[in-house]
Structure formats: C-alpha cells, structure tokens
Image: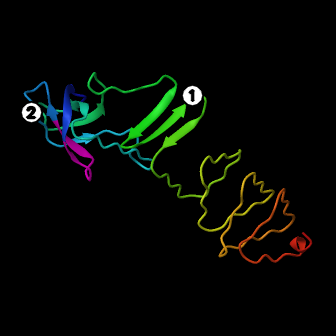
C-alpha cells in the first residue's frame, strides 16, 4: 500500500560519502537532526551521477514514516542567500574552482586548473591553440604542418619527415644539420 509522504526543508548537517547519505538539520522542526538520509541521484545503476552536497547546503527531504528516521534527500534548492547565477540558454555545472558550460548553440566551455582526458581523442574540426603546446612524446602529422611563427627544437630531439618540408624563410640550427636538401643553401 502506498503511504503518505511528508516533506521538510533543512540544511546538510553532516555527510557520509561512503554510504551516500547525510544528516539534515530540519529548520521547521526546532533544528532537529535527522538520522542518515539517502541522497537521491538521477542515475545509480550502470550509469551513475554522484552529487554529494556540501555542509550547509539547503535541501528538501521526504520521510516515509513519522519523525525524521527514514527518508530521502530529494534535492537542493536556491534561495536569496544561495543564488543560482543561471543564464538563459546555458547548462552549467560549477564545482569548487571548475565549471562546465554548454550553450544552446552547441558551444562548450570548460574552466579548470587542469583538464585530463584519459582516452583516445579524435578532433574532426580545426583547432586553435592560443598559448603554448607541449607534447611529452610524439607528434604525427598525416598531411601538412604549417608553421606561421617559429618551430623550435632542442638538440636532444629529432625531426623526421617523409615527403616535402617547405620553408618560407631561413632555417637555422644551434647544432649540426644533416640533409642533402640544405647543403645547397
């Protein structure tokens, strides 16, 4: 039989990350502290989303019995003291000092100290790098490499090319350079 659920507003009092539960201070009930309540999540089986709220996060809880023993934290909410900063046409995730923004036009912006991608990556459009590019191992160019500025390599590196190297300007080296094509310069 389906029973009646009761709800209450509160703030996160303590968190049990391992069990995905939290205790909540119920503001409308003389600041009573609940037992550990399960935090609901949109996905929990093979695909998962994990959202552990911070202490003092305002939340809404539902209870399956009398009192504050058995229930669920069904979500957090925004208020005058906890504003969303929402922008129309944007899906935004802010976490600590990082953010992910997906706009209606399909553009994606990631702000973080470090972004690590642990998989193969295929880029099918142009790439613009506005700062330095550092490569730890190997770069393979299948078609053409155009360098508008300076291409620099220290003496411990090796530059291998199959095909043609077109240089529009001077070629200089701090070390010995061996190539039949450069002998006639």
Residue 8 is drawn in which quadrant? Answer: top left
* Span colored in magenta: 14-24
Q: Earlier in the sequence, mark 1 or mark 2?
A: 2
Disc 2 packing (10 Å; few <14; some 14–19; many ≥20): some
Please tell me whether residue 176 belongs to the stretch shown in magenta: no
The residue lying at 83 percent from left, 68 percent from top is 162
Quadrant, the C terminus = bottom right
Secondary structure predominantly adopted by residues drawn in magenta: strand
Q: As rendered, which of 108 and 154 lies closer to the eye? A: 154
SS assignment at label 1: loop
Q: Nearer the viewer, mark 1 or mark 2?
A: 1
Residue 169 image offset from top left, x and y in percent:
83, 57
Label 1 and label 2: CA atoms lie apart by: 43 Å
Query: Disc 2 designates what residue?
Result: 32
Residue 35 image offset from top left, x and y in percent:
14, 41
Query: Disc 1 designates what residue?
Result: 104
Identify the residue at the far right of this view: 184
Q: Is residue 11 left or right of residue 40?
A: left
Please tell me whether residue 19 belongs to the stretch shown in magenta: yes
């Amino acid at each position: 039989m389906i029973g009646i659920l009761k709800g209450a507003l509160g703030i996160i009092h303590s968190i049990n990350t391992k069990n995905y539960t939290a205790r909540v201070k119920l503001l409308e009930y003389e600041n009573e502290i609940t037992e550990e309540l399960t935090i609901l999540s949109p996905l929990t089986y093979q695909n998962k989303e994990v959202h552990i709220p911070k202490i003092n996060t305002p939340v809404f809880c539902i209870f399956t019995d009398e009192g504050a023993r058995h229930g669920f934290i069904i979500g957090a909410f925004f208020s005058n003291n906890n504003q969303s900063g929402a922008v129309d046409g944007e899906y935004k995730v802010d976490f600590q000092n990082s953010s992910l923004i997906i706009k209606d036009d399909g553009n994606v912006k990631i702000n973080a100290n470090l972004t690590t991608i642990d998989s193969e990556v295929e880029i099918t459009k142009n790439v613009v790098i506005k700062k330095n590019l550092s490569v730890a191992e190997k770069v393979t160019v299948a078609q053409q490499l155009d360098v508008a500025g300076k291409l620099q390599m220290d003496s411990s590196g090796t530059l291998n090319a199959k095909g043609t190297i077109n240089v529009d300007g001077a070629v200089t080296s701090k070390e010995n350079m061996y190539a039949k094509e450069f002998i006639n310069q």
